[in-house]
Image (cartoon, rainbow, N blue to C red):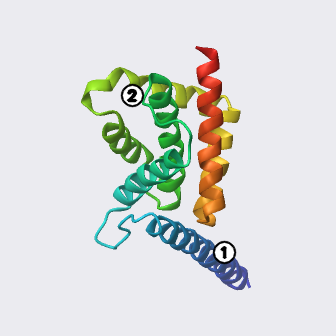
Amino acid sequence: MMSWFGKKKRDEKFLVDMMRAAAEGEGTARLKSSLATLGVDVSESRKPAQIAGYGALALLKEASERSNFSASTEDTDFIDGVMLMVFSNHMSYVLQCSFEVTAQFVLAIHFGVEKTSQMQEAIASYNKMSHGNSSFIRAVGNSCIKWCNVSSEQNLNSLGELRNMLLESASKQT
């Protein structure tokens, strides 16, 4: 009689695991489809961290193109750096790869070697804000998730508008 209960539990666990795997696969497929609309190579030959990294960079580029702020300033670098961290976090989670590897890769490309202090400031601020449940992180994260689930022009425009608001707020504080 005990083995019957054990088999039932095992079968239930198997079904739950299968449903979870199907849901994760669907999220991965949806993200890859969205990234492909930005021209990101999502082929199987790419490592998930590369897909997440190039995806985060491409999404920031699209948000920047829809934004009124084009001049590069310290505020722009900072806001973009934190946005890249948020994008990297979500995409690495969906693609089940290392956030740390993805974020370092993305920030190294974005900031380059000459701006290591700005890169460190963006990392420290992201860590502080993410632990503090910041509205900045939530807003960027929710907009990223929305676009990743539905890669529409409207959602890209929303990311651009959000970037504008963040940059306007930062410029008023300086």
Residue at coordinates 66% horizontally, 51% vertically from top-left? 158
Observer-nearest of 75 and 82: 75
Q: Determine the residue located farthest toward the left in the rendered image.
A: 113
- Looking at the rendered structure, the secondary structure element under dot 2 is helix
The relative height of residue 85 versus residue 123 in the rendered view (above or below) is below
Q: Quadrant of the C terminus?
A: top right
Instruction: Residue 147: give its label.
Output: none
Residue at coordinates 39% horizontally, 48% vertically from top-left? 102
The relative height of residue 73 versus residue 67 in the rendered view (above or below) is above
Q: Which residue bears the numbered disc 1?
A: 16
Residue at coordinates 55% horizontally, 49% vertically from top-left? 66
Observer-nearest of 135 and 26: 135
Residue at coordinates 40% horizontally, 23% vertically from top-left? 118
Q: Earlier in the sequence, mark 1 or mark 2?
A: 1
Q: Nearer the viewer, mark 1 or mark 2?
A: 2
For label 1, count other residues whose C-alpha is less than 10 Å away and answer few (under 14), some (14-19) or many (20+). Answer: few
What is the spatial separation of the Cα atoms under label 1 and label 2, in whole angstroms? 41 Å
Q: Determine the residue located farthest toward the top in the rendered image.
A: 174
Query: Left or right: where does residue 104 sit relative to residue 79?
Result: left
Q: Which residue bears the numbered disc 2?
A: 119
Query: Left or right: where does residue 130 sit relative to residue 79?
Result: right
Q: Position of residue 37 (x, y in %)?
A: 47, 68
Residue 11 placement: quadrant: bottom right
Disc 1 marks a residue whose amino acid type is: Val
For label 2, count other residues whose C-alpha is less than 10 Å away and answer few (under 14), some (14-19) or many (20+). Answer: many
In this rendering, the count of numbered labels is 2
- Looking at the rendered structure, the secondary structure element under dot 1 is helix
